C-alpha cells in the first residue's frame, strides 16, 4: 500500500536528499542508536513483564556489500507494527527532526549547509547517502512488514516473510557515496560514535570492541585502575592521569560527568593552544567530540566525557550551544570541577601542589579573565614566597593570615626565577621588616595581578612600585657609624635629580627601603616593566615612551657616600658614576632600554680612575 509523507517529513527529506553537507557519516550513528534504542525497549519490556522467557541476546549487525553498493543494519529489538511504521517513519514525532523543523521555521525555510549539518535528523539522515531505503520489521505483536521509500514524497508498506522480531534496514547507496559500503570505513565510524553502545555490534560478522561507559556507573562500582584505563584508552595516553572527578547530578540538567586532569600540560612544549577534549554524549552515543563554548577557554586542559540524557540526540554542534542547554551543562560541570580542586587542596595539599605546578597557568588565566569564576579561582592560586624554600607554594589566604600589623597590601615580585628576584634591590626592604613577598615567575603573573587588583580587599602591590607605603615595622639594618649629614643628603639628592633630569626621574628618595644595595629604581609609571617587555616584544621597531621612576638611594651605603665626596672633587666623573648607578638600578628593575651605552660608560670610568 502506498502512503504520503506528512508535509513536514517531506520538507526534511527534501533538505536531506539535496544537501551538500559533508558530514554524511553521522547517518551510521543515527541508525545504530535507533537499533540500540529498539533493543533497549525490548529488554525493558521483557524485564517489566516478568515473563519467564529469558531476556534474549540482543545484538546489532551491520553488513556492507561493495558490489551491490549497500549498507545494512539489523537488530533484534522491538520492531514495529504497521501503525507504528506509519507513525514513526511517516510523521515527525521525535525530538531531533522536530528541532530541525523549528530551526527551519526560524530561518524562514532558508537553511545554510552549515545549519543542516547541525542536525542528525535521525532516521531520515540515511537519505543523505541512499537513494532507496528498505525497512523490514516485525514486532512481537505483529507480522513481517516491508517499508520502502526512494526519497520522494511517497512510501509503501507491504507484507513480507520476515519471521523474527526486530528490524533490518537496507540502504541502497548513491553511486557517489560508495564509501559507506566499505567495511573499514564503517568500522572507523562505528568506533568513533558508538564505542559505548550497550549491545554488541557486529560488522560483517566480526564483533566490534564494546567499551564500558564507566561514567554512567556509580563511583563505588568503578576502581581506580578502571578510571586510569579508561583515560588511557579514550585519550590515547601511555601515562595515568593526575587526578579525576566523577559525578552525577539530576538538576538543573541530568548529567554524568567524568573529568580528568591529564599527566602533563601539553602546552608546556610550546605546541600552541590545546583544544578542549571533553566530549559530549547522550546516553553513550557521541554527540560532539569537542563542543565549543561549553567551557571557558581556561578549562581546555581538562579531558573527559559528559553525558546528558537531556540532550536531544539528533541535535549537535552549534544548535546546541544556542539552545543554552550546553552552556547550562558546562556551567554545572565547571562549578563542580572548581569545587573538586578546592576540596583536593584541603584534603591533599601535596597532590594539589602537583596539579598546580603543571596546570596552575590555566587557573591563573581563568582568574585573570573569567570574571564569573574569578572569586573561586583566586582561592586556588598558589605562589612561591620569600618565607619558604624554593618549590614550596602558598595560597593567598595563607599570605593574609601572616600579614603584619599595619600591612595593607599583598606584596609580590615578578622575575624569571627566585635568584633574579632576590638579587634585585627591592626585596631587602621587605625582608628586613619581616614582610612576606610572593614570588611570581610566569609571564602571565603580572597581568594576573593587574587584572585581579586585590584579594579579600587587600590590594596587590609590586615590590618595585613607588606607591608602596611600608608599615612601620622595625628595620633591622646595620647601624651607620658615620652617617651623611641631613644637609649634605638634601644637597646630594638635588644634585642627583638635576643631573639625571626630570624626564628620567620624578623624585629622588632616601627613605628606609634599602639595606645593602646603594640604589633602586621604583616604578612610578602606570606601565609595569612586564607590560613594557610585552609591548617591546610585540612591536620591536616602535619606541616606547621612556619609563619614569623614583630613584631611591641608600645613604648608609659606602657607594653613595663615595659619590657624595666625588662630586666635590671631580664632578664630571661623579656624573658618569651616577649615570652608571642609575642604569644599574634600571637594569635590576627590568627597565633598561639600551644596555650597550652601559658598557661604553664603564670603560670610560675605568680609564679615568687614577691610581692614588
Ligand atoms: P528518534 O530516534 O529521535 O526517535 P528517529 O528519526 O531516529 O528519531 O527514529 C524515529 C522513530 O522510528 C523512532 O522513535 C522509533 O520509534 C522508530 N525506529 C527507528 N529505527 C527503529 C528500529 N531499528 N527499530 C524499531 N523502531 C525504530
Ligand atoms: Mg534516532
Image: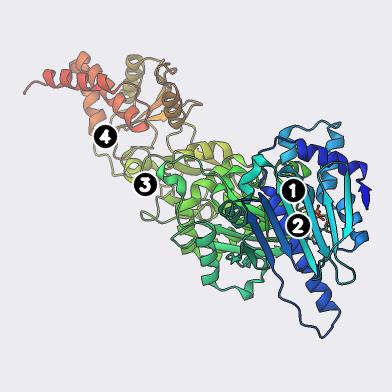
C-alpha separation, residue under disc 1 versus residue under disc 4? 85 Å
Q: Which quadrant of the picture is home to ligand 1?
A: bottom right
The answer to whether 502 is drawn above or below residue 314 in the figure is above
Given this view, does label 2 or label 3 mark the residue nearer the observer?
Answer: 2
In the drawing, does residue 522 fall left or right of residue 317? Answer: left
In the image, residue 44 lies at what x, y percent?
81, 73
The residue that label 3 is drawn on is: 432
Given this view, does label 3 or label 1 mark the residue nearer the observer?
Answer: 1
Q: Quadrant of the C terminus?
A: top left
Is any atom of residue 70 visible in this view? yes
Of helix, strand and loop, which one carries label 2? strand
Front-most of residues 510 and 224 = 224
The residue that label 2 is drawn on is: 169
The residue that label 4 is drawn on is: 557
Front-most of residues 227 and 174 = 174
The residue that label 1 is drawn on is: 126
Amino acid at each position: 500500500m502506498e502512503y504520503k509523507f506528512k508535509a513536514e517529513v517531506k520538507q526534511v527529506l527534501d533538505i536531506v536528499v539535496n544537501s551538500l553537507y559533508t558530514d554524511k557519516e553521522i547517518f551510521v550513528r543515527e541508525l545504530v542508536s535507533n537499533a540500540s534504542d529498539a533493543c533497549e525497549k525490548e529488554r525493558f519490556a521483557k524485564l517489566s513483564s516478568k515473563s519467564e522467557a529469558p531476556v534474549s541476546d540482543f545484538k546489532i549487525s551491520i553488513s556492507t556489500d561493495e558490489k551491490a553498493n549497500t549498507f545494512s543494519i539489523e537488530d533484534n529489538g522491538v520492531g514495529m507494527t504497521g501503525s507504528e511504521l506509519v507513525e514513526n517513519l511517516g510523521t515527525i514525532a521525535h525530538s531531533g527532526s522536530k528541532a530541525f523543523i523549528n530551526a527551519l521555521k526560524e530561518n524562514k525555510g532558508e537553511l545554510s549547509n552549515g545549519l543542516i549539518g547541525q542536525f542528525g535528523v535521525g532516521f531520515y539522515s540515511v537519505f543523505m547517502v541512499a537513494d532507496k531505503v528498505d525497512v523490514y520489521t516485525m514486532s512481537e505483536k505483529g507480522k513481517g512488514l516491508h517499508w520502502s521509500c526512494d526519497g520522494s514524497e511517497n512510501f509503501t508498506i507491504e507484507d513480507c516473510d520476515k519471521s523474527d522480531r526486530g528490524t533490518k534496514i537496507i540502504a541502497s547507496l548513491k553511486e557517489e557515496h560508495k564509501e559507506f559500503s566499505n567495511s573499514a570505513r564503517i568500522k572507523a565510524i562505528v568506533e568513533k560514535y558508538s564505542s559505548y553502545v550497550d549491545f554488541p555490534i557486529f560488522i560483517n560478522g566480526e564483533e566490534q570492541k564494546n567499551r564500558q561507559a564507566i561514567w554512567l556507573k556509580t563511583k563505588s562500582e568503578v576502581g581506580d585502575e578502571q578510571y586510569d584505563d579508561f583515560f588511557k584508552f579514550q585519550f590515547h595516553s601511555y601515562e595515568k592521569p593526575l587526578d579525576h572527578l566523577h559525578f552525577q547530578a539530576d538538576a538543573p540538567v541530568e548529567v554524568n560527568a567524568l573529568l580528568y586532569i591529564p599527566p602533563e600540560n601539553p602546552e608546556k612544549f610550546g605546541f600552541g593552544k590545546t583544544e578542549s577534549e571533553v566530549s559530549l554524549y547522550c546516553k553513550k552515543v557521541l554527540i560532539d567530540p569537542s563542543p565549543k563554548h561549553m567551557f571557558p577557554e581556561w578549562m581546555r586542559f581538562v579531558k573527559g566525557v559528559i553525558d546528558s540524557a537531556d540532550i536531544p540526540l539528533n541535535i549537535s554542534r552549534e544548535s546546541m550551544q544556542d539552545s543554552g542547554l550546553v552552556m547550562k551543562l558546562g556551567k554545572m560541570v565547571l562549578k563542580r570541577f572548581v569545587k573538586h580542586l578546592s576540596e583536593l587542596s584541603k584534603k591533599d595539599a601535596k597532590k594539589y601542589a602537583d596539579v598546580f605546578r603543571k596546570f596552575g597557568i590555566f587557573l591563573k588565566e581563568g582568574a585573570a579573565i573569567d570574571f564569573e569564576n574569578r572569586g573561586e579561582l583566586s582561592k586556588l592560586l598558589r605562589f612561591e614566597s620569600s618565607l619558604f624554600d624554593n618549590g614550596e607554594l602558598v595560597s593567598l589566604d595563607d599570605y593574609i593570615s601572616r600579614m603584619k600589623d599595619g600591612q595593607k597590601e599583598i606584596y609580590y615580585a615578578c622575575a624569571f626565577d627566585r635568584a633574579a628576584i632576590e638579587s634585585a634591590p627591592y626585596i631587602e626592604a621587605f625582608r628586613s621588616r619581616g614582610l612576606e613577598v610572593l614570588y611570581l615567575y610566569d609571564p602571565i603573573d603580572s597581568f594576573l595581578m593587574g587584572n585581579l587588583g586585590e584579594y579579600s580587599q587587600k590590594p596587590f602591590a609590586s615590590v618595585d612600585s613607588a606607591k608602596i607605603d611600608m608599615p612601620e615595622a622595625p628595620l633591622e639594618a646595620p647601624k651607620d657609624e658615620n652617617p651623611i649629614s641631613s644637609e649634605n643628603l638634601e644637597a646630594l639628592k638635588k644634585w642627583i635629580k638635576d643631573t639625571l633630569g626630570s624626564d628620567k626621574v620624578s623624585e629622588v628618595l632616601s627613605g628606609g627601603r634599602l639595606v645593602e644595595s646603594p640604589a633602586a629604581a621604583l616604578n612610578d609609571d602606570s606601565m609595569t616593566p612586564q607590560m613594557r617587555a610585552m609591548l617591546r616584544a610585540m612591536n620591536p621597531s616602535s619606541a616606547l615612551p621612556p619609563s619614569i621612576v623614583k630613584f631611591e638611594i641608600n645613604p648608609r651605603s659606602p657607594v653613595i657616600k663615595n659619590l657624595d665626596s666625588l662630586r666635590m672633587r671631580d664632578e664630571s666623573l661623579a656624573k658618569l658614576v651616577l649615570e652608571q648607578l642609575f642604569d644599574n638600578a634600571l637594569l635590576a628593575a627590568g627597565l633598561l632600554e639600551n644596555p650597550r651605552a652601559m658598557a661604553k660608560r664603564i670603560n670610560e670610568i675605568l680609564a679615568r680612575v687614577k691610581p692614588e
